[in-house]
């Protein structure tokens, strides 16, 4: 699939068919994530891929944003201790979530390229998910990405207009 | 260009030839950004594209992370007031930077697809850049993206290993 087709065609999918996602495909999605840039090339991310039904059930219980029944969830995590040691407060508080989000966008596009549907979840109980995933001290789940074969692909939501200025804010031409 | 080729092939470019980037291309990059998902479809982002040499000089002065002499910089901004009204504290403090970063990754890939080089800059004086760009109260520059025709494309930096766990952290198989 062409880059532009993936960028425009990717939707947030919240309804999945009951079919597992091959492990090799999930590994490929994580690899896509790791090709994102990171501040100072810190790469303080870690990806926990969950496919076990009991683990998925536990995560769902503490993640109001997780809709449908995806056969896999990728928890995009950051080692905030390492991020702080490498990049100070900017590293831990700002670059770590930003890097995780850029990695996440790569995952979404690689998934769409493979015919998979995804949805990014930002609304979940971080502490509870960290416990469920057994994350070590200082590591935090930043975003969850549900992954599966789409049962339904929604229409593109309307895009906001007037999002671009030239040279200075408000200069539209 | 294929999605996977773009994801793997994109490098952070910090050295640009002295050649402007067509306005239509810059508009296309911003459009790529706007196709990223956003928390609750809030789309509280705004993109200020800077190509004026005097404006670029001003931004460079307050952005230690901005290397080389890119002919264009895209400031990926967020209206934190609007983000807060739409998504509360989660919206303003977490979703806004995360959404900006996902939009940024789309910009990087679309630029690479067009043969352009980019670099994400997180190290800059936010208040100073906001003033230079004339951002309204409550709007903040989250990331800067330098854009230009690459003079030099660096080799891929080494990727961190052991970034994936299965079901629970530390479970490598």
Image (cartoon, coloured by chain):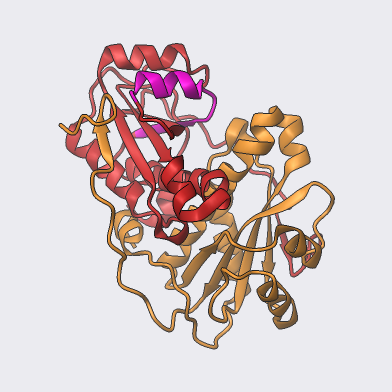
Chain colours: A red, B orange
Residue lying at the far right of the rendered structure: B137
The image quadrant that residue A111 belongs to is top left
A119 vs B57, left or right, is left
Instruction: Answer above or below: position of B152 versus A9.
Output: below
Residue A45 in picture, x, y percent from top left: 38, 44
Residue A85 seen in the current view: yes
Which region of the structure is painted magenta?
A117-134
Residue B60 in picture, x, y percent from top left: 66, 75
Residue B133 in picture, x, y percent from top left: 77, 65
The image quadrant that residue A150 belongs to is top left
Q: In which quarter of the image is the C terminus of chain A?
A: bottom right
Residue B54 in picture, x, y percent from top left: 74, 81
Residue lying at the far bottom of the rendered structure: B18
Residue A113 sits inside the magenta stretch: no
Residue A158 seen in the current view: no
At horizontal 31% and vertical 32% (from top left) the residue drawn is: A48
At horizontal 61% and vertical 30% (from top left) the residue drawn is: B40
């Amino acid at each position: 699939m062409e880059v532009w087709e993936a960028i425009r065609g990717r939707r947030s999918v919240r309804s999945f068919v009951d079919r597992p996602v091959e492990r090799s495909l999930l590994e490929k999605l994580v690899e896509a994530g790791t090709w994102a840039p990171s501040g100072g090339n810190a790469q303080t991310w870690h990806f926990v891929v969950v496919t076990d039904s009991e683990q998925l059930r536990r995560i769902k219980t503490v993640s109001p944003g997780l809709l449908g029944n995806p056969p896999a969830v990728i928890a995009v995590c950051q080692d905030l201790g390492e991020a702080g040691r490498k990049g100070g407060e900017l590293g831990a508080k700002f670059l770590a979530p930003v890097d995780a989000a850029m990695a996440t966008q790569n995952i979404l596009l690689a998934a769409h390229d493979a015919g998979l549907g995804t949805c990014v979840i930002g609304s979940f109980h971080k502490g509870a998910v960290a416990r469920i995933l057994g994350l070590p001290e200082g590591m935090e789940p930043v975003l969850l990405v549900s992954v599966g074969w789409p049962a339904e692909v929604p229409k593109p939501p309307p895009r906001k207009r007037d999002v671009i200025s030239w040279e200075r804010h408000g200069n539209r031409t």
